[in-house]
Amino acid sequence: SDGSTINGGAGGNGTIFSMKTSGSDFTILHSFFPAIPGPNPNPNGEAAPYSALLLSDGALYGTATFGGSNGMGSVFSIRTNGDGFTVLHDFAGADGQCPNASLLLVGNTLYGTTLDGGARSNGTIFALSTNGDGYRLLREFSPPGSTNAASEGCSPWGGLIQGGSTLYGTTYY
């Protein structure tokens, strides 16, 4: 079984771990470190992996709500043995900010939501391939008080589910 924590670990910003279902063999696969300037920089620090991990073909996929090269969160992958931690996408605001929910995998496409960001700063629905290519912004939510927000909501907090060719989700506001 694999999981994540939002705080602690060697970097203080959470961990990805594995352990046997019996509770034995607890192993830290990855520690999230803050962005650090200086002689040993870590400019792309990741923080707070709030969501559950997704497992497919020996890889774990997840989101870090904060950090990344723009400080607005990221989508990442890592092998189940702890090798190959890779940032698949760094959010920059206009394309989303603060991914807070688990990802959905359909074929080789990851689907997800961001709590904030987009042109209207009220969350997004996005898609990208499992290798990080082809990022697509599928939906930008409208601000509270707007006619669209009154009917569609904004700030998607939870993950998406799929039925056929349809995605389903919820908004916080």
Image: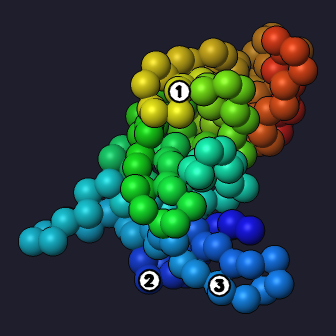
Count residues near mark 2 (Cα–Cα under 10 Å), then give few for <14, some for 14-19, many for 20+: few
Eye-nearest disc, 1 or 2: 1
Q: Which residue is mark 2?
A: 10
> Does the residue at mark 3 contact the one at mark 1 (Cβ under 8 Å)?
no
Question: 61 and 74: which one is in front?
Answer: 61
**Which part of the image, by quadrant, shows the C terminus?**
top right
Q: Earlier in the sequence, mark 1 or mark 2?
A: 2
> Which residue is drawn at the image coordinates 57% and 61% (left, top)?
80
> Which residue is drawn at the image coordinates 68% and 50% (left, top)?
55
Image vertical order of residue 95 relative to residue 44, above or below: above
> Which residue is drawn at the image coordinates 65% and 84% (left, top)?
26
Residue 150 pos. (x, y %): 86, 18
Q: Residue furthest front?
A: 57
Specify the quadrant of the image occupied by residue 50.
bottom right
Q: Which residue is mark 3?
A: 26
Residue 82 pos. (x, y %): 48, 66
Q: Residue furthest bottom?
A: 24
Which label belongs to residue 129? 1
Amino acid at dot 2: Ala
Amino acid at dot 3: Phe
Colour option used: rainbow
Q: Give the distance between the C-alpha atoms of the residues marked 1 and 2, in whole angstroms.
A: 30 Å
Q: Earlier in the sequence, mark 3 or mark 1?
A: 3
Which label belongs to residue 113? none
Question: Which secondary structure, mark 3?
Answer: loop
